[in-house]
Image (cartoon, grey):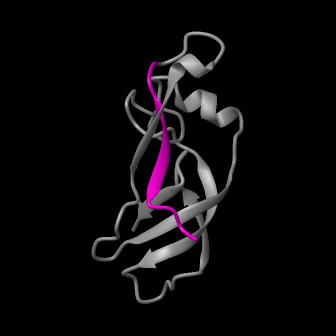
Amino acid sequence: MPSSVNRQWLLTTRPAGMVGPEHFTLREQPVPQPGPGEIVVRSRLLSLDPANRAWMSPVPTYKSPVSPGDVMHGFALGEVTASNVADIAVGHVVDGMLGWQDYARAD
């Protein structure tokens, strides 16, 4: 059964050396609702890899860095829980940059 709470890990401060729990904050928000042309995805599998560390730096890589206060970026595999897209139904499995959170809204 889907939750009504979306747990999100936010980057609090950019690490200068090793990454630790002091660089993150856990925030709980309501599960987002999809707008026009959007879906909501419940993450089932999150990839944690060396690229995560590079994204914490203020220097852009192949993507923009994570800003302090934002949900930590992360590639995930998830299940669609709500959809306003004709070709994507509830229950479809999708992947993308969904972030370190239980639920993500995507277009």
- At 53% across and 41% down in the image, what residue appears? 62
Horizontal and vertical percent position of residue 81: 50, 74
- The answer to which of 39 and 60 lies nearer the viewer is 39
Q: Is residue 20 left or right of residue 32?
A: right
- The answer to which of 18 and 90 lies nearer the viewer is 90
Q: Is residue 45 left or right of residue 63?
A: right
* The image quarter in which residue 91 lies: bottom right
How many numbered marks have been drawn onto this rendered protein structure? 0
Q: Is residue 59 above or below residue 77?
A: above
Please tell me whether residue 9 belongs to the stretch shown in magenta. Answer: yes
Please tell me whether residue 94 belongs to the stretch shown in magenta. Answer: no
Most extreme residue toward the left is 36
- At 52% across and 49% down in the image, what residue appears? 101
Most extreme residue toward the top is 16
Q: Which residues are magenta?
A: 1-13
* The image quarter in which residue 106 lies: bottom left
